[in-house]
Each structure stands twice: as structure tokens, then as C-alpha cells.
Amino acid sequence: MSEFVKVERDGAVLVVTLARAEKKNALTGAMYEALTAALAEASADDAIGVVLIEGSGGVFSAGNDIGDFLAFAMKRGAEMKDAPGVRFIYALAAFAKPLVAAVDGHAIGLGATLCLHCDLVYASPAARFHMPFVDLGLVPEAGSSLLVPQRLGRARASQYLLLGESFDAEVARADGLVNTVVDAASLHAHALAKAKALAAKPRQALLATRRLLRGDPAALTARMGEEVDLFTAGLKSPEARAAFMAFMQRSKG
Ligand code: COA
């Protein structure tokens, strides 16, 4: 388990907080394991109807820990298939109960693509989404190459995934990623109230409707498999190594 992921119950809602604010809630292997365990806990417990995911310290998440990416890139014969991050994204895609996100500040990489798996996304005016995979020598992950065009349209997919442009909360709302923009001070209470409203619905009808809304799960997992293979190759590319090294050196300087 990780001290950087806090899991608390609030009625029928499991509140999962990314709590590594000093590193912008960048996600480590231990944090992915804690997140996967939180989803398993929520799945197994009938008293939990919904999971709410939020960040801390004015940031949602800066995505995968770049030091971990660099370590992987330098390791000969390293395979991603069993990596904690990969296990987490499959658990996220397979999770059957509603997911709600409260996004304040940066949501980068998986911080952004995680939101595509959420049924309701609330964001503060300071939220900023960025999926800079191509610039890092990588490809989109967590099914985002399928989910971004589905949810936001092809034009936006090209803008956000090929050009790698970041976008703010209001644009995310207009594009259909975010439901409502809420002041940072009210964000947690607002998202929690919506999560509780969902959790209070007739459970079978809620879960069946969610399953219908999400479409074919096989298409999503097949796409995720393709992405993992391409992502693994990307991590080993000279472009990716150079981008990770540049970031690590910047953060030291
Ligand atoms: N992995 C590892 N460490 C990270 C990180 C990441 N993804 N994102 C931020 N951090 C660390 C920084 O190295 C820094 O550590 P330090 O204080 O020990 O030097 C600390 O978090 C604060 O980040 P900093 O860059 O100084 O803050 P900022 O406000 O200037 O910028 C971000 C914030 C999020 C815009 C910037 O940190 C960033 O671009 N992060 C990388 C995002 C990314 O490309 N993620 C991968 C997506 S696939």
C-alpha cells in the first residue's frame, strides 16, 4: 500500500485521494497498487455504490512518475504487461460501479486519461488537462486513443493527442469531458454530493444503465492491449529517454 493514496468512506462513497502533492501527485508503482486495491475493495463491498477520485494540494495528477518511466526505459528486457500501472488501467476499465472525478489543477497523462473512464467529472476553474504522449515519444494509454475521439470527437482528438495541446476547465466542459466547472472551495462537496446521489439510486438499474452507456468493453480492452505494446516500444525510444532526462534534469536544477 502507499501512504500517497488515501482511501476513506463517506456513506456509500469510497473517496480515493491522490496525496503526493509535493510531486504533483505523480503516480508510482505503489500508488497504482493502492488504487487497484481501492477499486477491488469498492467492487467487493455492496455498501459502496460509487468511487470518487480526487487530487490534493491544488493538483489532480501530473501522470506517471517520470523517474519510474526513465528507470523502465533503461532496463533491458523490461516488460510493461504486468506493471502496476497497466494492472490499474485494466482494473479501471473493468470497474463496474460509477466513477466520479473532482479535478483541481493539472491533470496530465494518466491524470487526464483516467477522467475518460469516469462517468461524471467536475473541475475547478484551475483545472488543466494535457495528454502530451506524442511529444514524449509515446502513444496514448488507458484506452484514450479510443475514448478521446468517442467522447470529444475526432477534431479534438487530433488537437489534444496529435498536437498535444493542453486545455482548461471551460474548454473541457464545452468539449464534453467535464460536466460542471465548480469553484475550488466547493469542488469536493459538489462532487461528493453527486457521487452520493448516484449511490442512492436503485443499484441494479444504475449498474445496468452504466454498462449500456459504456458500450462494448471488448473493444476497449483490445485497444488498451494495442496501446500497451506501442507504449512499451515508445518508452524505449531515444525520443522518450531524451524527454524524461530533460524533465529530470529540469526538476533537479
Ligand atoms: N514525475 C515525477 N516527478 C514529477 C512529475 C512526474 N510526472 N511531475 C512533477 N514532478 C515533481 C517535479 O520533479 C518536482 O520535484 P522536485 O520538487 O523534487 O524538483 C515537483 O514534482 C514539483 O514539480 P515542478 O515541475 O517543480 O512544478 P511546476 O508547478 O513548475 O510544474 C507540472 C508542474 C505538473 C506542469 C510539471 O511538473 C510537469 O510538467 N510534470 C510532468 C508532467 C508529465 O509530462 N507527465 C507524464 C505524462 S505521460
Image (cartoon, rainbow, N blue to C red):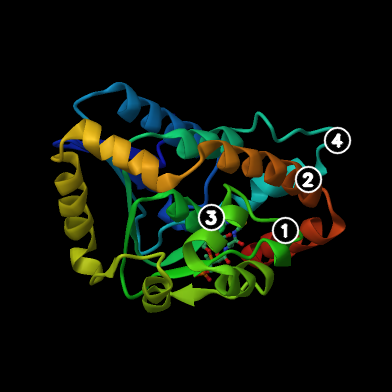
Can you give x and y, in whole percent of width and height, for residue 177 in the image?
41, 64
**Mark 2 and mark 3 in contact (Cβ < 8 Å)?**
no
Inter-mark Cα distance, 1 to 4: 17 Å
Ligand 1, image quadrant it occupies: bottom right
Instruction: First in sequence, mark 1 or 3: give its number.
Output: 3
- The alpha-carbon separation of the residues under discs 4 and 2 comes to 8 Å
Could you tell me residue 46's position as x and y percent?
A: 22, 24
For image coordinates 25% across by 68% down, the residue present is 184
Residue 15: % across, % down: 27, 42
Please tell me whether mark 1 or mark 3 is closer to you in this view. 3
Pointer 1 with pointer 2, Cβ within 8 A: yes
Element assignment for label 2: helix
Camera-side residue: 94 or 42? 94
Are discs 4 and 2 less than 8 Å apart at CB? no
Q: Amino acid at mark 3?
A: Leu
Q: Which residue is mark 3?
A: 147
Q: Quadrant of residue 104?
A: bottom left
Which is nearer the N-term, disc 1 or disc 2? 2
Residue 142 appears in view? yes
